[in-house]
Amino acid sequence: MALTLTAEQRLLKDNATQFVRESAPVGQLRKLRDTKDATGFSADLWRQMAELGWAGIVVPEAYGGSGLGYTELGLVLEACGRTLAVTPILSTVVLGSGLLLGGGSEALKRELLPAISDGRGLVAVAFEEAPRFKPYQVACKAERHGAGYRLTGQKTFVLDGHVASRLIVSARTSGNPSDRHGISLFVVDPAQPGVKIERATMLDSRNAARCTFEAVEVADAALLGAVDLGADLLDPVLDRAAVCVSAELLGLISQAYETTLEYLKTRVQFDALIGSFQALQHRAVDMFCEIELAKSLVLDALAAVDEGREDAPLLASAVKARLSDAASFISREAVQLHGGIGMTDEHDIGFYLKRAAVAEASFGDAAYHRDRFARLKGF
């Protein structure tokens, strides 16, 4: 494919970048953190994003969405990454609507997708139980009970789980806790008896709740896809999530680099601009090269998802591994090149380091995806 954007995509990227700079600067994240905001993101900002069509950007028009693709969603996330904008895009748009579109009944789609598209509905996916990313490590049980199922177990790292109007929960209906087969997915109302949600805040000041299910009863109609085959629904959605996080990381490292470059051009030490020091120029060039490589890989991975290419899982792991490494390198270089001020909370560059650290681990870190890439290639 040609690694270029169409005129419409360039316009979307420019408009998204301008919007987040004006409406969701880094200062908003700082305010959310310092005020210990109960929601964890700006409800008014999310409403504005929904009005722009971002909440339903990958939802078909039949369900109230924009009917666009993951390339367009990636451009929006890249813009959000530049200002570290806090939104429920990953939890609701990428994970929630992705699973509903992949395995939801027509009734569930018509109930939940229009609400997601207009910003009223938030969906959180509770699938993680281990300290590190292991999507098939599922001990939460779903036992047959009457005309439905009874869920019992715990989940962690549930993005935006404390404010979700619906949860999608992975539970084991057969097999052992580490088996890929035997996982089923259920839509759960968090207001049901037996559901307990505890808000947690990560290093980057974003939300990741802990959820406990104590004999929570759900009907057969709440099942997504087929019994025991939930991993078949999860896999492509988690691949898209890895690609989307990579797109956000691309925006993050691009802005961290540009901020650092501007600092090198203005900071004076020993009666000279520090950007004139050759050693620092070399480090800036290394950062630039990493970003240029990342741009092509992210765009190709997004296109692979939209085109349904066979190499989409390979590219999802390749891009997440590459962007995780690049984000770790560039965010740390950015802090170091800022010197002492970069180590203080006063400067925004530290927020980029923290967000990079959390995003690197989200949906599999570099080591996980290099191993997965090798396995997919048959090594």
Image (spheres, rainbow, N blue to C red):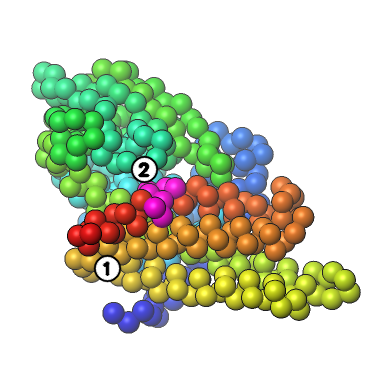
Mark 1–mark 2 CB contact (< 8 Å):
no
- 3D distance between C-alphas at marks 1 and 2: 23 Å
Q: Position of residue 300 (x, y in %)?
A: 33, 71
Above or below, comparing residue 250 to residue 285 in the picture: above
Left or right: 6 in relation to 34? left
Front position among marks 1 and 2:
2
Instruction: Say which of 377 and 49 sits in front.
Output: 377
Q: Quadrant of residue 74?
A: bottom left
Using a 10 Å C-alpha cutoff, classify the residue at mark 2 as few (fewer than 14 neighbours), some (14 to 19) or many (20 or more). some
Where residue 372 sits: x, y (%)? 29, 54
| Residue at 89%, 74% in the rendered image | 271
Q: Residue at x 48, y 75 (%)?
A: 292
Q: Residue at x 69, y 72 (%)?
A: 280
Residue 304 is labelled as: 1
Quarter of the figure that contains the N terminus? bottom left
Q: Is residue 365 magenta?
A: yes
Type of the residue with mark 2: Phe
Residue 102: percent from left, percent from top: 20, 50
Q: Which residue is mark 2?
A: 133
What secondary structure is found at the residue carrying circle 1? Answer: helix
Q: Which residues are magenta?
A: 361-367
Amino acid residing under circle 1: Ala
Whether 1 is among the magenta residues is no
Is 253 situated left or right of 240 in this image?
Answer: right
Relative height, residue 350 to residue 217 (above, below) = below
* Relative depth, front residue between 92 and 305: 305
Please give the count of numbered marks on the rendered protein. 2
